[in-house]
Amino acid sequence: MFPADHVDVWLVQLEEPVQAFSPDVLSSEELARASRFHFDKDRLHFTRCRSALRLLLSRYLEIPASAIHFEYQASGKPELTEQQNRRGLHFNVSHSGGLALVAVNAGHRVGIDIEKVRHDVDVPTLAERFFSARERAGLRALPEDLRVPGFFACWTRKESFLKATGDGLSFPLAEFSVTTHPDVDPGLEELRGDTEAGNEWFLADLKVCDGYRAAVAVDGTPSRLETYSHVYTF
């Protein structure tokens, strides 16, 4: 079903082979990019993630996976060419560890992020570098046992918003704030001082797998968010 006014989220297990994978599915540029990875595992994850993305998009667009052409924004975010995207399909991809998430939406910009939770992170140092003053204050207000979950909640919410805008890290990280409590519904608290800007954005946490944190951001309010949380190996 074409995702008109709703968001489909697909979970892809990168440790398992994509059954329909063939080198012919990927473009020469993607194969060249894969060859530049130093470690075999990283190269394998990239090729499986890209082939899964192509196979998913081919179902929505009803064209062969190998026929899909990507264009790239200045931030590096891939998007479909206008000729192949008459229905305004948007998508975004994120992967961490052995998992990847693909978000697909029609008519609204979408961003997604997944992170494998690590308990050895230097929360104060990273927060000082990447979070806004409001977000840092929110993290400090959390009980000690919620600091790491709060950090990854904030990180994935913030990253999903950045990816949805298409600006990536070129967007000043201190000029917007998301909620930091890991057990409270996410939201965009302010954007360049505008506390009402969050009304124009939809943010949601995604429960995909133990040991991971994930979030999705949409420019607008979708009528439905559907997460296909089973392992999708094609």
Image (tube, rainbow, N blue to C red):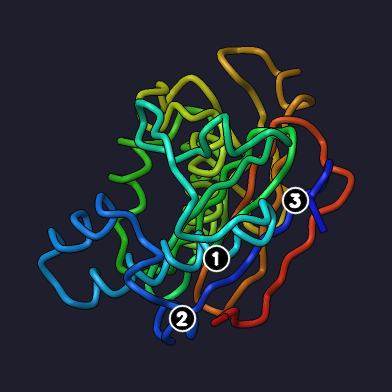
- Left or right, 41 with reference to 99: left
> Disc 3 or disc 2, which is closer to the eye?
2
Q: Amino acid at mark 1?
A: Leu
Q: Residues within 10 Å of mark 1 (few under 14, many from 20)?
A: many
Residue 68 spot, x, y in % from top left: 49, 50
Can you give x and y, in whole percent of width and height, for residue 172 in the image? 40, 21
Q: Residue furthest top?
A: 193
1 and 2 marks in contact (CB < 8 Å): yes
Name the residue that disc number 2 marks. Answer: 18
Q: In the structure shown, which secondary structural element does the residue marked by tag 3 occupy?
A: strand
Mark before the other along the chain sequence, 1 or 3: 3
| Marks 1 and 3 close (CB-CB < 8 Å) | no
Circle 2: element type: loop
Alpha carbon distance from label 1 to label 2: 10 Å
In the figure, residue 95 lies in which quadrant?
bottom left
Q: Secondary structure at mark 1?
A: helix
> Given the image, on which type of amino acid does mark 3 rest?
Val
Q: Residue at x 56, y 13 (%)?
A: 192
The residue that disc 3 covers is 7
Amino acid type at circle 2 is Val
For mark 3, does the 10 Å Cα neighbourhood hold few (<14), some (14 to 19), or many (20 or more) residues?
A: many
Q: Earlier in the sequence, mark 3 or mark 2?
A: 3
> Residue, x 57% and y 43% (percent of image)?
111
Is residue 126 depicted above or below 152 in this figure? above
- The vertical placement of 193 against 1, above or below, is above
What residue appears at the point 82 percent right and 59 percent down from the top-left corner?
1
Compute the Cα span from label 3 to label 2: 23 Å
- Indicate the position of residue 73 as horizontal and vertical percent values: 40, 29
Q: Which residue is mark 1?
A: 55
Residue at x-position 62% and y-position 53%: 103
Image vertical order of residue 7 relative to residue 199, above or below: below
User: Which one is in front, 61 or 195?
Assistant: 61
